[in-house]
Image (cartoon, grey):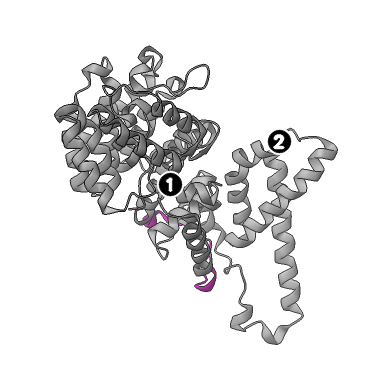
């Protein structure tokens, strides 16, 4: 059942919301379908097609709810026009128009992501609501991804759902002309979804392959839908080049492997070539956006013949361009890694301490981890141990925790930066 929930939630919800025409109702019906499956599958066995079983059950519950509501209204004709009893479903649209809108976004799950990224909601609310409802991420993991507390994230999701209800924002697939206005939020959702798969925020495994694969599938579907959008190309390139190293990020014993430890001959050369073509085409097309620049940075890491031969100066230059375009504290922190390799750990530590004082990354485990490694390289091992303990307190992924614990007992200050050794795609902030 847990496997079915991870793999099928988004598909089942997307199919159900088309019937319910209401996100809250659809979510309730899908939850009820999963609850019914617990007893039915234990009694009868898991069906050959769990997604179809769950979708059918959820749709039936949605139709039953709609029928009950219509029956209720038919018995209270004098109140039909009351605002308090306004129908949950919007007026039916012309069938041909509905077909046209669905054809505009053929992939069911991508269609629902575009629908949830409604411009009436703040971007943070769009990201949180979509990651929770469509992607099925737990609220604590979304909170970690967006660097806020679990309570703040739960409240944000609740407010977004309430606004949809109070403002009567209908479930409606956006028209083709509306897609560009929602694109930035959709790209952010797919990026965060992949990041949560590439390095799971919590749990026993470093990678959540189901999330990473889903994000890659949706990014490819988005590319087919909007092939001329440079940032769509850039996001796909970023995901592909990052995922090319998936098989080498942990050893046979599950231990995290540093970037310099990974077997580069096992990296997916086809994926790296695909990403390179996307990046080159994007850079030729004009001004590079933030996803394309991140992809170019990741490609430079991946294309170096060896770890020692990485072009640190060029990576710093690309980070400078990215930071000018996207002044995020996470980007500034990531930049300190190649700075430490090109200009030394002392300068990088000064930059990290400035970011630490800023306070916006107080929940971001990679800040104390990077600081600890820089301190180790400078021979300040006692201070490094304190920083590693801070990183451990903020880290919930068991593979990363084991790595950090190992570093607490490792007294080799000449090692290179933690994030480079992890090969982690750092989690972006909401803006």
Residues at marks 2 and 1, CA–CA distance in whole angstroms: 32 Å
- Relative to 421, say whether 71 is above or below: below
Where are the magenta residues, as a range? 165-180
In the image, 104 versus 223, the foreground residue is 223
Q: Residue at x 32, y 33 (%)?
A: 382
Q: Residue at x 40, y 29 (%)?
A: 408
> Tag on residue 49?
2
Which percent across, then down, holds residue 428? 35, 45
Task: Please say whether residue 358 is visible from this viewpoint.
Answer: yes
- Relative to 99, say whether 47 is above or below: above
Which percent across, then down, holds residue 367? 32, 41
Which percent across, then down, holds residue 160? 49, 64
> Is 317 positioned to the left or the right of 425 in the image?
left
Which percent across, then down, holds residue 42? 81, 39
Q: Are marks 2 and 1 in contact (CB under 8 Å)?
A: no
**SS at circle 1:** helix
Counting residues from the start of the chain, the first of labels 2 and 1 encountered is 2
State which quadrant residue 298 falls in: top left
In the image, 285 versus 379, the foreground residue is 379
Neighbours of disc 2 within 10 Å: few (<14), some (14-19), many (20+):
few
> Is 377 positioned to the left or the right of 72 in the image?
left
Q: Which residue is mark 1?
A: 145
Q: Residue at x 42, y 44 (%)?
A: 192
Q: Nearer the viewer, mark 2 or mark 1?
A: 1
- Is residue 178 part of the magenta span, yes or no? yes
**SS at circle 2:** loop
> Tag on residue 124?
none
State which quadrant residue 234 falls in: top left
Q: Residue at x 35, y 28 (%)?
A: 241
Task: Please say whether residue 103 is visible from this viewpoint.
Answer: no
């Amino acid at each position: 059942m847990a496997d079915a929930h991870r793999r099928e939630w988004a598909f089942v919800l997307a199919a159900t919301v088309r019937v319910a025409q209401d996100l809250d109702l659809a979510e309730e019906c899908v939850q009820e379908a999963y609850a019914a499956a617990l007893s039915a599958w234990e009694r009868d066995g898991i069906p050959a097609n769990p997604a179809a079983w769950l979708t059918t059950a959820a749709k039936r519950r949605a139709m039953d709810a709609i029928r009950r509501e219509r029956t209720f209204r038919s018995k209270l004709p004098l109140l039909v026009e009351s605002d308090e009893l306004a129908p949950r479903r919007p007026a039916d649209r012309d069938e041909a128009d509905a077909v046209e809108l669905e054809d505009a976004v053929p992939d069911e799950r991508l269609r629902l992501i575009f629908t949830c990224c409604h411009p009436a909601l703040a971007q943070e609310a769009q990201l949180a609501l979509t990651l929770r409802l469509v992607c099925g991420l737990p609220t604590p993991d979304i909170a970690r991804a967006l660097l806020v507390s679990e309570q703040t994230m739960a409240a944000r999701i609740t407010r977004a759902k309430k606004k949809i209800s109070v403002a009567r924002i209908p479930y409606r697939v956006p028209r083709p002309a509306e897609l560009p206005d929602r694109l930035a939020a959709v790209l952010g959702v797919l990026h965060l979804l992949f990041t949560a798969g590439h390095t799971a925020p919590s749990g026993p495994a470093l990678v959540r392959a189901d999330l990473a694969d889903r994000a890659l599938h949706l990014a490819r579907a988005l590319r087919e839908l909007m092939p001329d959008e440079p940032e769509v190309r850039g996001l796909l390139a970023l995901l592909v080049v990052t995922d090319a190293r998936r098989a080498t990020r942990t050893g046979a014993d599950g231990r995290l492997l540093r970037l310099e430890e990974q077997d580069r001959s096992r990296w997916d050369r086809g994926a790296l070539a695909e990403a390179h073509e996307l990046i080159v085409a994007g850079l030729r097309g004009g001004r590079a956006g933030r996803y394309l620049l991140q992809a170019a940075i990741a490609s430079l890491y991946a294309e170096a013949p060896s770890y020692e031969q990485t072009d640190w100066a060029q990576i710093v230059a690309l980070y400078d361009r990215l930071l000018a375009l996207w002044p995020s504290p996470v980007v500034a922190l990531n930049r300190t890694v190649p700075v430490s390799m090109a200009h030394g750990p002392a300068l990088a530590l000064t930059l990290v301490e400035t970011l630490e004082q800023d306070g916006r990354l107080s929940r971001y485990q990679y800040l104390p981890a990077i600081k600890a490694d820089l301190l180790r390289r400078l021979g300040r091992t006692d201070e490094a141990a304190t920083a590693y303990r801070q990183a451990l307190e903020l880290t919930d992924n068991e593979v990363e925790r084991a790595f950090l614990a190992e570093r607490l007992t490792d007294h080799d200050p000449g090692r290179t930066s933690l994030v480079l050794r992890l090969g982690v795609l750092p989690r972006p902030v909401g803006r």
